[in-house]
Amino acid sequence: MIPKKLRDFIFKLQSATENNQLSWQEADSLAYFCDHKNHTLHINSHFDEDRCMSSFHFRLVTDGKSTPFTVRDDEDDYSIMQHLYESIIVNANNIENDINDFFD
């Protein structure tokens, strides 16, 4: 679950990501990162084939301190993290430029 102290932060992060106030980069096929001020954010999606369980792993790194948490698909916060993750992908791919001329 999203830790209580980080819950509001995640909602603000979602908004800032969707409003292009932050810039995300793809680290590899399922992982993304964002460097902002003295913070680095990491998020990745994981599927455990043995347990048939999906999860999102999030980590906030500030001044060498790492604060990770995981949200599994059987937890209430999973849809929040999925929405954030999908917004991050759109941001990292700069999709707005790709779709501007789609219907022209």
Image: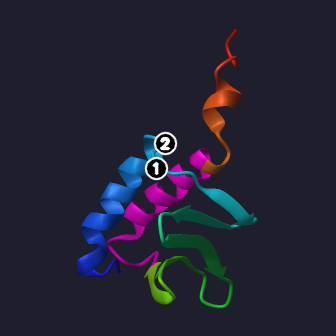
| Image height of 10 relative to 99, above or below | below
- Coordinates of residue 50 in the picture (x, y in percent): 67, 91
Query: Badge 1, how many Cα within 10 Å: few under 14, some, many 20+?
Result: many
Which residue bears the numbered disc 2? Answer: 20
Tell me if residue 50 is in the magenta stretch: no
Front residue of 53 and 103: 103
Front residue of 80 and 20: 20
- Coordinates of residue 33 in the picture (x, y in percent): 60, 66
Structure colour scheme: rainbow
Residue occupying the point 69% across, 17% down: 101
Q: Amino acid at mark 2?
A: Asn
Residue occupying the point 52% across, 70% down: 41
- Coordinates of residue 87 in the picture (x, y in percent): 51, 50
Q: Which residues are magenta?
A: 72-91
Which residue bears the numbered disc 1? Answer: 17
Residue 101 relative to residue 15: left or right: right
Front residue of 48 and 6: 6
Label 2 with label 1: CB-CB less than 8 Å: yes
- Coordinates of residue 83 in the picture (x, y in percent): 45, 55
